[in-house]
Image (spheres, helix red, strand yellow):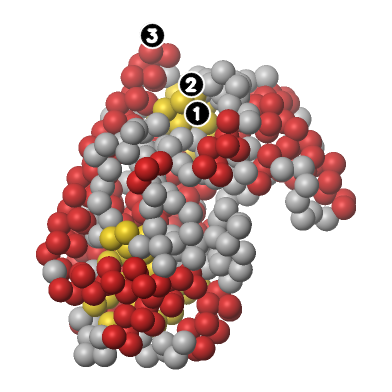
C-alpha cells in the first residue's frame, strides 16, 4: 500500500503497539517520537528486539513549551511524507499550526485534561508558551476528523465534550499493548531477557498468593482525576493479611508516581513490610513477566475505568483484575464487558482476595475471558477500523 501513516507521540506505549499491528498487515506506518516522551514509554521499553529503530523517527517538537517557538514550516516539513496523521498529546495543536488536520486523535487523558487548562502550576516565564498551547489545543481537538476514545468516566467525558466539535468518535478500545510480544508460551524467553525475572520468580516460588499493583502512586487528593486509591488497596491488603495469617501472600509495588514516599511510609505504618515487596519503576517488558507470574493484577480504586495501560497489560497477561468499576457507565456500549474482581473499599478488597483463595479457578477463568475480550473487542475491532480508514484514503 503506497500511502504512508504517521503516529505522533507514544504516551503509554499505545502508538508503538498500533504501528506494529499495522506493519504486520503490510501498512507503511512510522512512529514519530516527540520532545516530551517519558523514558519508560520509549519503544525499547516494550520490545526485546531492535526492529523499531527502522520505523521510528525523532521530532524536535511536541511539548507545550515548544509549540510557540516551532515554525509552521518545520512542522509541515516533518509531516510532509505522510498522508495520514494519527496522534495523541498536543498533536492536534501542532497540526493546527501547520495547517494540517489530524486524521485520528487518540487521547491518553492529560491531553484533554491538563493540556486544556489555562490555570495550572507553571513558572511565570512559561506562561506565554503554555497559554498558547492551551489555546491551540482547545481549538484543534474538535477539528480532528476522528477521536478514538473508549467510553470513560464522567469527569473525562465532560471535559472531552467541551471541545469535541464535529469530530466523529470511535468507541472501540485502543490496542495499546502489542500482545504477540507477550504470549504466555514465551515466558521462559521473557524471564531470561528481562532485568528482574530472577527476583519475580523467587517471589512466586515462595508465595501462595502473588498480587501485582504497578499503577502510579497518586493518592494525596481523591478529587484529583488521576488519583489511584493506593491507600485503599493497602488498607484492604492489611485486612486480608490480618484475617488470613496462614496464607503466604505477597503484594508487589513499583516506585512510580509522586506519592511513592507516602506509600512507603503507609506500608510501615500498617506494619506490612513482610508482605509488600517494592520494585523500581520498570519497563513494560519487565513488568509483563511479573504479571504473567501473578495471581491477580490491581487496577484503580477511586475512579472507574475499563481501559488503561495497566488494565490492558493485565488482560494481555490473562490475569483477573482487582479494581473499582462502575459498570452502569459502560454496559450500554459494551454489553460483553470483561469480568473483574470488583472492589472499591478496604473491606471489599479483602473479601475479593479471600474469594480468590477459596476458588482460584474462578479467578483464572476471569483472566481467560479478559484476554479473549482484548483479542476480540480491542485488537480485532480497532484494527478493522484503522485498516478500513487507511484503505479509503488510499483510494
Residue at horizontal 37 percent and vertical 78 percent from the top: 237
Mark 1 lies on residue: 147
Q: Please give the residue where the numbered disc 2 appears in the rendered image.
A: 168
Q: Position of residue 256 (x, y in %)?
A: 52, 68
- Looking at the image, residue 195 sits to the left or right of residue 161; the answer is left
> From this viewpoint, is residue 299 visible?
no
On the question of residue 161 being in view, the answer is: yes
- Between marks 2 and 3, how big is the CA–CA gap? 21 Å
Residue 358 horizontal side relative to residue 20, left or right: left
Q: Secondary structure at mark 1?
A: strand
Percent from the top left, x then y, of residue 27? 35, 27
In whole angstroms, how far apart are the C-alphas of marks 2 and 1?
Answer: 6 Å
How far apart are the alpha carbons under marks 3 and 1? Answer: 22 Å
Nearer the observer, disc 2 or disc 3? 2
Disc 3: which residue: 395
Give whichever of 59, 357 is nearer the camera. Answer: 357
Quarter holding the N terminus? top left
Q: Secondary structure at mark 2?
A: strand
In the image, what residue occupies the spot 82% across and 49% down? 126
Q: SS of the residue at dot 3?
A: loop
Q: Mark 2 and mark 3 in contact? Answer it, CB < 8 Å.
A: no
Residue 26, position as x, y percentages in the image: 30, 28
Front residue of this view, candidates 33 and 119? 119
State which tag comes first along the sequence, 2 or 1. Answer: 1
Amino acid at each position: 500500500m503506497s500511502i504512508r501513516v504517521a503516529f505522533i507521540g507514544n504516551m503509554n506505549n499505545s502508538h508503538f503497539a498500533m504501528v506494529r499491528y499495522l506493519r504486520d498487515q503490510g501498512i507503511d506506518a512510522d512512529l514519530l517520537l516527540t520532545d516530551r516522551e517519558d523514558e519508560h514509554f520509549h519503544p525499547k521499553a516494550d520490545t526485546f528486539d531492535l526492529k523499531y529503530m527502522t520505523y521510528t523517527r525523532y521530532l524536535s517538537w511536541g511539548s507545550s513549551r515548544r509549540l510557540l517557538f516551532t515554525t509552521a514550516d518545520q512542522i509541515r516539513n516533518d509531516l510532509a511524507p505522510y498522508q495520514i496523521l494519527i496522534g495523541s498529546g498536543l498533536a492536534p495543536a501542532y497540526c493546527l499550526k501547520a495547517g494540517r488536520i489530524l486524521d485520528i486523535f487518540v487521547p491518553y487523558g492529560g491531553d484533554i485534561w491538563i493540556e486544556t487548562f489555562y490555570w495550572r502550576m507553571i513558572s511565570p516565564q512559561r506562561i506565554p508558551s503554555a497559554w498558547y498551547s492551551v489555546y491551540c489545543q482547545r481549538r484543534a481537538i474538535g477539528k480532528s476528523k476522528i477521536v478514538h476514545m473508549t467510553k470513560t468516566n464522567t469527569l473525562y467525558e465532560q471535559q472531552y465534550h467541551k471541545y469535541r466539535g464535529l469530530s466523529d468518535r470511535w468507541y472501540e478500545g485502543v490496542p495499546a499493548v502489542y500482545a504477540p510480544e507477550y504470549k504466555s508460551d514465551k515466558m521462559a524467553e521473557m524471564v531470561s531477557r528481562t532485568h528482574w525475572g530472577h527476583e519475580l520468580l523467587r517471589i512466586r516460588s515462595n508465595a501462595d498468593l502473588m498480587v501485582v499493583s504497578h499503577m502510579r502512586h497518586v493518592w494525596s487528593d481523591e478529587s484529583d482525576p488521576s488519583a489511584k486509591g493506593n491507600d485503599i488497596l493497602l488498607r484492604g491488603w492489611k485486612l486480608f493479611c490480618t484475617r488470613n495469617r496462614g496464607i503466604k501472600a505477597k503484594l508487589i509495588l513499583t516506585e512510580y508516581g509522586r506519592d511513592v514516599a507516602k506509600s512507603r511510609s503507609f506500608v510501615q505504618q500498617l506494619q506490612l513490610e513482610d508482605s509488600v515487596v517494592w520494585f523500581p519503576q520498570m519497563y513494560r517488558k519487565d513488568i509483563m513477566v511479573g504479571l504473567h507470574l501473578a495471581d491477580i493484577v490491581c487496577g484503580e480504586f477511586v475512579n472507574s475505568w475499563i481501559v488503561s495501560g495497566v488494565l490492558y497489560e493485565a488482560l494481555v497477561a490473562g490475569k483477573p483484575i482487582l479494581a473499582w468499576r462502575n459498570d452502569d457507565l459502560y454496559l450500554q456500549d459494551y454489553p460483553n464487558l470483561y469480568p473483574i474482581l470488583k472492589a472499591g473499599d478496604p473491606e471489599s478488597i479483602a473479601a475479593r482476595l479471600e474469594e480468590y483463595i477459596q476458588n482460584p479457578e474462578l479467578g483464572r477463568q476471569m483472566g481467560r475471558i479478559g484476554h479473549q475480550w482484548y483479542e476480540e473487542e480491542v485488537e480485532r475491532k480497532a484494527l478493522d477500523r484503522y485498516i478500513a480508514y487507511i484503505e479509503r484514503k488510499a483510494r
